[in-house]
């Protein structure tokens, strides 16, 4: 019995659908629940014109002990650049190299009222203009493990190995973005993104991690809100 | 003639083969497990950015001697192994970028001698480096403290004065996998910090401003200062590298200048 090309294509499509459904089922089982909250304060009108770009910078000023994780900054920058109405985003490292030494931890402006004076530097102002930087987005905050419980033991012998136990931990992500307009040197708004979730790892021979993607959730919410805010979308 | 016996046909070989394989796996596992505690070897052959500043209208000669270019920091941290940072490998790129950005013309000199092709001579020196890893400080950060001393000479190699410049860099352990990339990021951050602070404060530092204005040093001062080049605020190396308080002392130290007065 032979199978026609149409049938083969149909079976392939069905197979792909099944794989997708299976992946979604496994993902929904293996990812823990995350609660997220987003808040926004708008101080001025915003808008992105053709040729405008933004840069997402992690706060790392001295002598502060806290630094925003590089992967969170990269995640927000990547999400802002992706999609149909993606923005022009200059990467943090490229921006810092292009504007060196003005945005290093010891030299970067901490308050928005320092920005107009900084923009009086002719070479820096020209460089920002060449890069088309309209908004500077400063990210502050971090993801922390707030609690953890349970125990897990693993053993290995010549006849095999395995783990037994149950672990649970809770992560809390709290970030705030402050948006500066480089044209008038003023803050245009603030967006905060908080997320928390509990991850589990039961182990009967094989450990099965059920991870709450707290930081990823905070990143997605933050970038979605930022994009709406900068484009001045209704409701943002 | 050697006869090759497949392992599944030779039970006596199979036993030893499994044993050998298990031993190998255990050894590899142990090696991987202990590698996390065996220190790190860090090399900083990186590119640095050119400072975006109005250049100072002088032709500067920067002495990059062997002592600076081969500077290595070695430290053994109890329970964490030996750490080696080849900081010298970053110096040529660092100072050539600084020279290009900061001065109208810049040339590299191999040693300190009078040179009429340049207006003034700068000799950078690394006085001290200290490191801290998250396991020591119970923080999330790899940290590097550096203390540079810049000696300012006229083009006859007479000293005008020196400027101590502390620099600091840190890197979050959550952003890097392992000690080596974490420590490298912290050391690079410290180098960038030194470059940034040097370039932004150069004009406001008295001895540097006099040097850039073409002031001459005197041979007497040069001899005196070179005999005892340390300033009163220079920091002695920490005897116990595990003491974070001592390390923090460098970070909090403000840049100081040791000036030699000309007559």
Image: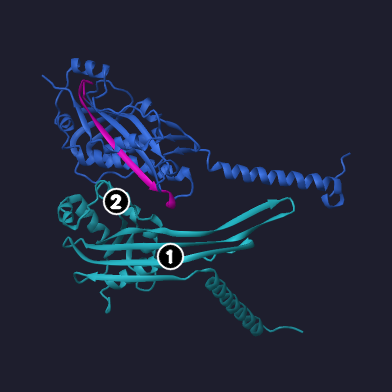
Chain colours: A cyan, B blue
Which residue is painted at 45% across and 43% down in the image? B135
Q: Where does label 1 land, which residue?
A: A214
Disc with the residue nearer the chain's start (2 vs 1): 2
Q: Is residue A230 visible?
A: no
Relative placement, left or right, of A223 versus A132 is right
Q: Is residue B263 left or right of residue B67?
A: left
Q: Residue at x 63, y 59 (%)?
A: A164
Q: Are marks 2 and 1 in contact (CB under 8 Å)?
A: no
Q: Give yes or no for residue B154 being in the magenta stretch.
A: yes
| Relative height, residue A202 to residue A8 (above, below) | above
Looking at the image, can residue B138 be seen? Answer: yes
Residue at the image point whose x is 34% and y is 30% from the top: B128
**Where on the picture, by quarter, is residue A26?**
bottom right
Q: Are marks 2 and 1 on the same chain?
A: yes
The relative height of residue B152 versus residue A210 in the rendered view (above or below) is above
Please name which of the two marks, 2 or 1, marks the residue nearer to the observer.
1
Image-quadrant location for residue A147: bottom left
Mark 2 neighbour density, 10 Å: few (under 14) some (14–19) many (20 or more): some
Residue B201's place in the image compared with A209, above or below, is above
Q: Position of residue B210 (x, y in %)?
A: 14, 30
Residue at (33, 34) in percent of width and height: B246
Relative image position of residue B47 (x, y in whole percent) = 37, 43
Q: Which residue is mark 2?
A: A98
* Element carrying mark 2: helix
Q: Viewer-proximal residue, B6 or B257?
A: B257
Looking at this view, is A141 or A22 the one in front? A141
Q: Is residue B217 magenta?
A: no
Chain identity of mark 2:
A
Q: Which residues are magenta?
A: B153-175
Task: List the single residue furthest toward the front.
Answer: A150
Disc 1 element:
helix
Which numbered marker is on residue A6? Answer: none
């Amino acid at each position: 019995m032979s199978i026609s090309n149409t049938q083969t294509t149909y079976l392939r499509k069905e197979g792909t659908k099944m794989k997708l459904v299976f992946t979604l089922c496994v993902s929904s089982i293996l990812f823990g629940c995350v609660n997220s909250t987003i808040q926004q304060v708008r101080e001025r009108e915003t808008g992105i014109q053709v040729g405008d770009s933004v840069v997402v910078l992690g706060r790392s000023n001295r002598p502060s002990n806290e630094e925003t994780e590089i992967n969170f900054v990269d995640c927000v920058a990547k999400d802002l650049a992706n999609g149909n109405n993606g923005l022009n985003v200059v990467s943090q490292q490229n921006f810092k190299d292009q504007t060196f030494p003005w945005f290093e931890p010891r030299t970067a402006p901490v308050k928005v009222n320092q920005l107009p004076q900084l923009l009086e530097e002719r070479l820096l102002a020209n460089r920002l203009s060449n890069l088309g930087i309209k908004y500077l987005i400063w990210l502050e905050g971090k993801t922390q493990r707030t609690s953890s419980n349970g125990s897990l033991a693993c053993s290995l012998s010549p006849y095999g190995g395995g783990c037994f136990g149950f672990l649970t931990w809770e992560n809390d992500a709290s970030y705030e973005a402050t948006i500066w307009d480089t044209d008038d040197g003023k803050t245009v708004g603030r967006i905060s993104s908080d997320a928390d979730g509990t991850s589990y790892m039961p182990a009967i021979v094989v450990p099965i991690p059920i991870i709450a993607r707290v930081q990823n959730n905070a990143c997605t919410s933050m970038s979605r809100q930022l994009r709406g805010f900068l484009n001045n979308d209704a409701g943002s | 003639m050697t006869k090759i016996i497949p392992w599944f046909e030779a039970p006596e070989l199979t036993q030893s083969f499994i044993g050998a394989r298990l031993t190998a796996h255990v050894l590899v596992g142990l090696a991987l497990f202990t590698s996390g505690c065996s220190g790190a070897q860090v090399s900083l052959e990186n590119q640095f950015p050119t400072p975006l500043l109005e250049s100072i209208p002088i032709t500067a000669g920067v002495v990059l001697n062997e002592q600076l270019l081969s500077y290595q920091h070695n430290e053994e941290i109890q329970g964490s192994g030996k750490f080696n940072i080849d900081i010298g490998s970053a110096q040529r790129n660092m100072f050539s970028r600084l020279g290009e950005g900061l001065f109208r013309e810049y040339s590299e000199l191999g040693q300190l001698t009078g040179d009429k092709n340049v207006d003034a001579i700068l000799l950078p020196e690394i006085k001290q480096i200290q490191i801290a890893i998250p396991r020591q400080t119970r923080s999330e950060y790899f940290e590097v403290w550096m203390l540079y001393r810049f000696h300012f000479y006229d083009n006859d190699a007479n000293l005008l004065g020196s400027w101590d410049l502390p620099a600091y860099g840190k890197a979050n352990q959550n952003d890097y996998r392992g000690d080596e990339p974490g420590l490298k990021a912290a050391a690079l951050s410290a180098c960038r910090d030194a470059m940034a602070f040097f370039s932004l404060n150069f004009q406001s530092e008295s001895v540097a401003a006099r040097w850039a204005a073409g002031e001459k040093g005197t041979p007497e001062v040069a001899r005196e200062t070179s005999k005892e080049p340390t300033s009163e605020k220079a920091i002695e190396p920490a005897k116990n590298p595990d003491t974070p308080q001592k390390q923090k002392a460098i970070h909090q130290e403000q840049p100081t200048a040791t000036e030699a007065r000309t007559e």
